[in-house]
Amino acid sequence: MNEYAPLRLHVPEPTGRPGCQTDFSYLRLNDAGQVRKPAIDVEPAETADLAYGLIRVLDGEGNALGPWAEDIDPQVLRQGLRTMMKTRQFDSRMVVAQRQKKMSFYMQSLGEEAIGSAQALALNRTDMCFPTYRQQSILMARNVSLTEMICQLLSNERDPLKGRQLPIMYSVREAGFFTISGNLATQFVQAVGWAMASAIKGDTKIASAWIGDGATAESDFHTALTFAHVYRAPVILNVVNNQWAISTFQAIAGGEATTFAGRGVGCGIASLRVDGNDFVAVYAASRWAAERARRGFGPTLIEWVTYRAGPHSTSDDPSKYRPADDWIHFPLGDPIVRLKQHLIANGHWSEEEHQAVSAELDAEIIAAQKEAEQYGTLAGGHMPSPASMFEDVYKEMPEHLRRQRQELGI
């Protein structure tokens, strides 16, 4: 008689589905100010508790608490709030433009604005960011031209990338923003390689890599961790855990019984798990990791716990696989509301200024969109010339491409 029950595979399931409110107790939350702050030269193994706790600074009343509550210049916080507002308002208008068939595709960062905004302000402009497709707030923080960004979205005749990239896959080298890759996870190994090159040259620039929770299941993620650990590459490895990879819950990628930050500790990398909707915590953790990298103490992996408040993209309907009101119940709240509350409590912002800044930013975005649309939209034409497909491939165009171009009459 067989003493064993039949074997079964465990298939992770989200704690909420349409019609059933999500139970967010799986998030493993700490109160604000509870998690310690180690020295920047801490041994990676000694950060294990930080990879399973949650670094938070702002409490429910907007007070900054604990060892990560640094004395941040109020102007930095004000700039951070403006950047988050600008990102959200830009996203909102671009989603409408996509619905009007002015562009083929769009991906917003609703609910995640604090992460890119705060880290961009914590780094130097000469540091290189290797983003995935929800870090447009980095470009906002670095004051990249909105008109150029929108031209890229519209794939028109002023598109800096000449229509060769999907909308939202920006490339702005002069702003430290590496070309976004549609192949998930490739940017992680690229960032580690760039950081290693910086160290080989004896430079002081560091790299910042970005990946989503779902893409950590790709082999490039693990390869990047190995090289970053072995060579102590000066890189920040950001894992944005927004709970969903398209329609797949984050537990499918391995976030159920452990944390994504825990993988870093296992690979010999100092690791932090941070409230990604707390701008002050994001800024403090980013500065800590940047200083660690710049001082030669090696990489840091940071898991940012946040929530993808909107659809994965304009092609997605999240109400098919999760409760429609999930974001309202997400316990870490809205990053814009939380920083606004903190600034108002400390006398550095007001409701009146918030409304005025919102109107100012909206006018700026509308003006940029109007200018960009003069150079064409998906519906209206004025696309890059077909001749451009032959350019930027070789330093000098070979004869067979010259013949093909002539045959096309362009």
Image (cartoon, rainbow, N blue to C red):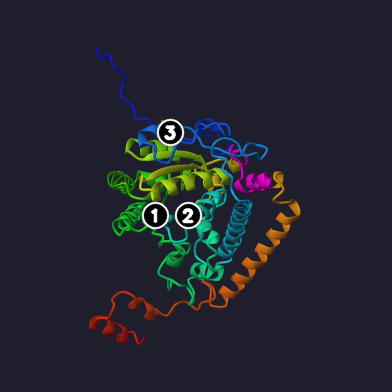
Residue holding disc 1: 206
Is disc 1 in contact with disc 2, using a CB cutoff of under 8 Å? yes
Give SS at disc 3: loop
Residue 190, above or below 153:
above
The x and y percentages for residue 160 are 45, 72
Is disc 2 in contact with disc 3, using a CB cutoff of under 8 Å? no
The x and y percentages for residue 406 are 31, 87
From which residue to which does the magenta span run?
A: 328-343
CA gap, disc 3 and disc 1: 31 Å
User: For residue 20, what is the image quadrant?
Assistant: top right
Residue holding disc 2: 123
User: Could you say which disc has been placed on residue 256 in the image?
Assistant: 3
Q: Looking at the image, which residue is at 44% across and 48% down? A: 291
Q: Looking at the image, which residue is at 62% across and 53% down? A: 81
The image quadrant where one finds the N terminus is top left
User: Could you say which disc has been placed on residue 90 in the image?
Assistant: none
* Of the pair 222 and 243, the residue shown nearer to us: 222
